[in-house]
C-alpha cells in the first residue's frame, strides 16, 4: 500500500525533488522563513524552531519527521546555533512544512519581531475590533473578519504577557 | 519591445505624412519647423516615460527579489515552472485545466502582453488538438482585449484595472477570483513573463494540481498533518499555495513589464532623435533654397534695371 502510494503520479515530483536537495552538511536544521515583501531567513542554519501549531506548539530540530502544520496566531521562536535567547516573531497564521532533509519552510503573509509590538495600540485595536464585531450582523462576512481581528489582537497581547477580554 | 517603438514612431509618421508629400514638391519652412517641434515634444515624453520606468523597475525588482525566496516552499510542493519554448508539448497540463494568463493593464511596453496572449492561444490550440478542454481567467486589460479575439469562447472571467504596484492583498483577491471561477478544474495553470534581467524576459507556466487527501494520487503522502485532519489542512494549504504562486508570478510579470517599457521607450526616443536630425537637414535645405531664390530675384531685378 505504502509503496503504491509513493509511486503514484502526483507525489512523484515532490519525492524526487526532496531527495535531490542536500541536507545541511553540518547536521543543523535549515529554515526558510520569508514574507511576501521581505526576506527574513533564506536557507539559514539554526539549532531549532518552536512553531505555534493550530494543534499546539511544537519544536523542530534537524531530522524531524516530515510534517505539514497549520499555524495559529502566536509566537514563533528561533533558537540559533550560537546559543543565546530565542529570537521571537509574532505570526498571524500560516503554514510550517518540515521536509525529510531537515529543511523547514515557514510561510506566512506577515510576521513582526515581538519587540516591535506595542501593548497600548494592540489594546485599542482590540477595542475597535470588538466594537465592529458587536455592531456587525450575525453570520455576515464583517462579523467573521472582526472576530479574526479580535483573536489576532488577543494573541498578540498574550504573546506580550497581557490578557485582554 | 519592437512593436511599441514602431507604434510610437508610426504615430509621429502619420502626423507627418501630408508634409512628406509637400516636402517633395516644396515643404514650407514653417511646416518643417512645426514638425521638428512636435517630434521633439514626443521625444521629451518618451524619454521621461523611460526614466519613470527605470525608477519603477527598481521597486519592482526589489519586490521580486523578496518574492522569490518567499515562494520557494510552494515550488517545493508543486514543482518547477516550464518555459514556453517552440517545441513545448504541454504534456503536463491535464484535461479541463483553468489557465490564468497574467498581462498588464497599460500598453507601451513592447511585446510582453502579445507574447502571453499568443502563448495562451498556442496552449489552447495544442490542448484542443489533444482533445483536452481548457478555460481562461485573464488578468489585465491588454490581455483581455487580445485574447477575446483569439480564444474568446474560453474566457470565463477577467480581472482588469488592477492596482499597481501589485501587493499580496491583490494576489489574495485574484486568488479568490480564480477560485470563484469554479473549483471543479483538474489543474490551475499560471502563464506569465519571467524576469531574467533588465533586457530579457521569457514566458513560463506553472501547473498547480489539486491536492487530494485520499486515493491513488494522494498528495504529500510521507507527511504527517497537524492538526490531524488532512483534507481540511490540504484545502487551506492549496488555496494559500495558489496565492503564493500567483503573487510570485505577478512580481515576475511586473518587473518584466517595467523593463520592457523602459526598453521600448528608449527605442522610441532614439527613433524620434533620428527623425529630428533628418528633418533639421531638410529644414536647412529649404531655408538655403529660399535665400538663393531671393538672391537670384534681386540680382536679376538689378541687372534688368541696369540693362
Image (spheres, coloured by chain):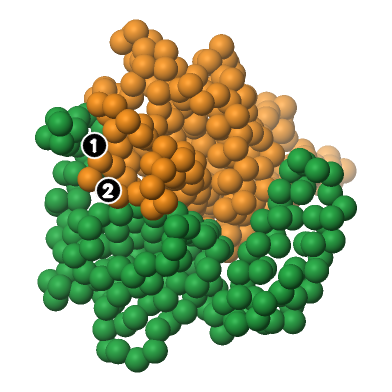
Chain colours: A green, B orange
Looking at the rendered structure, which numbered label has been put on residue B11?
Answer: none
Q: Nearer the viewer, residue B50 or A94?
A: A94
Indicate the chain on which mark 2 is placed.
B
Q: Nearer the viewer, mark 2 or mark 1?
A: 2
Residue occupied by mark 1: A11
Q: Are marks 2 and 1 on the same chain?
A: no
Q: Residues within 10 Å of mark 2 (few under 14, many from 20)?
A: some
Q: Residue at x 48, y 63 (%)?
A: A35
Residue occupied by mark 2: B223
Indicate the chain on which mark 1 is placed.
A
Residue A77's quadrant in the figure? bottom left
Instruction: Pinpoint residue A40: horizontal percent, then vertical percent.
Output: 43, 72
| Vertical position of residue B276 compared to residue B61: above or below | above
Instruction: Pinpoint residue B250: horizontal percent, then vertical percent.
Output: 51, 46
Q: Nearer the viewer, residue B252 or A163?
A: A163
Q: Residue B195 vs residue A125: left or right?
A: left
SS at mark 2 in the image: loop
Instruction: Pinpoint residue B234: horizontal percent, then vertical percent.
Output: 41, 41
Q: Nearer the viewer, residue B175 or B230?
A: B230
Q: Nearer the viewer, residue A14 or B246?
A: A14
Q: Residue B150 vs residue B28: left or right?
A: left
Instruction: Pinpoint residue B63: horizontal percent, then vertical percent.
Output: 50, 61
Q: Residue B207 vs residue B56: left or right?
A: left
SS at mark 1 in the image: helix
Q: Residue at x 55, y 32 (%)?
A: B179
Q: Residue at x 71, y 55 (%)?
A: A147
Q: Quadrant of the C terminus of chain B?
A: top right
Marks 2/1: CA–CA distance:
11 Å
Q: Residues within 10 Å of mark 1 (few under 14, many from 20)?
A: many
| Vertical position of residue A8 compared to residue B2: above or below | above
Does residue B197 appear in the picture of this structure? no
Amino acid at each position: 500500500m505504502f509503496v503504491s502510494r509513493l509511486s503514484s503520479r502526483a507525489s512523484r515530483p515532490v519525492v524526487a525533488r526532496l531527495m535531490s536537495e542536500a541536507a545541511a552538511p553540518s547536521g543543523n536544521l535549515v529554515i526558510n522563513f520569508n514574507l511576501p515583501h521581505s526576506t527574513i531567513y533564506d536557507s539559514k542554519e539554526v539549532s531549532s524552531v518552536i512553531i505555534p501549531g493550530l494543534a499546539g506548539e511544537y519544536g523542530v530540530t534537524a531530522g524531524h519527521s516530515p510534517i505539514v502544520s497549520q499555524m495559529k496566531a502566536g509566537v514563533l521562536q528561533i533558537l540559533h546555533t550560537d546559543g543565546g535567547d530565542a529570537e521571537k516573531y509574532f505570526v498571524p497564521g500560516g503554514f510550517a512544512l518540515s521536509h525529510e532533509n531537515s529543511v523547514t519552510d515557514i510561510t506566512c503573509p506577515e510576521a513582526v519581531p515581538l519587540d516591535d509590538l506595542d501593548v497600548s495600540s494592540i489594546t485599542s485595536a482590540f477595542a475597535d475590533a470588538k466594537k465592529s464585531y458587536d455592531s456587525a450582523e450575525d453570520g455576515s462576512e464583517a462579523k467573521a473578519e472582526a472576530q479574526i481581528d479580535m483573536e489576532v489582537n488577543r494573541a498578540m497581547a498574550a504573546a506580550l504577557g497581557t490578557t485582554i477580554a | 519591445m519592437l512593436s511599441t517603438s514602431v507604434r510610437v514612431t508610426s504615430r509621429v509618421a502619420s502626423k507627418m505624412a501630408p508634409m512628406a508629400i509637400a516636402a517633395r514638391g516644396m515643404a514650407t519652412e514653417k511646416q518643417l519647423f512645426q514638425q521638428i517641434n512636435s517630434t521633439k515634444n514626443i521625444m521629451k515624453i518618451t524619454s521621461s516615460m523611460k526614466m519613470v520606468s527605470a525608477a519603477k523597475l527598481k521597486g519592482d525588482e526589489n519586490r521580486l527579489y523578496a518574492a522569490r525566496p518567499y515562494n520557494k516552499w510552494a515550488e517545493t510542493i508543486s514543482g518547477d515552472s516550464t518555459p514556453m519554448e517552440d517545441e513545448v508539448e504541454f504534456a503536463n497540463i491535464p484535461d479541463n485545466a483553468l489557465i490564468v494568463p497574467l498581462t498588464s493593464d497599460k500598453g507601451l511596453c513592447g511585446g510582453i502582453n502579445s507574447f502571453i496572449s499568443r502563448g495562451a492561444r498556442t496552449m489552447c490550440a495544442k490542448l484542443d488538438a489533444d482533445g483536452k478542454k481548457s478555460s481562461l481567467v485573464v488578468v489585465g486589460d491588454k490581455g483581455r482585449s487580445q485574447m477575446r479575439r483569439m480564444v474568446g469562447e474560453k474566457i470565463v472571467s477577467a480581472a482588469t484595472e488592477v492596482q499597481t504596484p501589485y501587493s499580496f492583498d491583490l494576489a489574495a483577491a485574484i486568488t479568490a477570483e480564480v477560485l470563484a471561477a469554479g473549483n471543479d478544474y483538474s489543474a490551475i495553470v499560471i502563464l506569465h513573463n519571467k524576469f531574467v534581467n533588465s533586457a530579457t524576459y521569457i514566458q513560463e507556466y506553472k501547473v498547480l494540481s489539486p491536492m487530494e487527501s485520499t486515493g491513488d494520487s494522494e498528495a504529500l503522502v510521507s507527511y504527517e498533518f497537524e492538526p490531524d485532519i488532512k483534507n481540511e489542512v490540504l484545502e487551506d494549504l492549496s488555496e494559500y499555495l495558489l496565492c503564493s504562486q500567483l503573487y510570485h508570478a505577478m512580481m515576475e510579470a511586473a518587473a518584466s513589464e517595467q523593463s520592457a517599457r523602459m526598453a521600448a521607450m528608449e527605442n522610441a526616443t532614439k527613433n524620434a532623435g533620428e527623425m529630428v536630425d533628418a528633418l533639421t537637414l531638410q529644414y536647412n535645405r529649404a531655408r538655403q533654397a529660399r535665400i538663393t531664390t531671393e538672391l537670384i530675384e534681386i540680382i536679376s531685378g538689378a541687372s534688368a534695371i541696369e540693362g
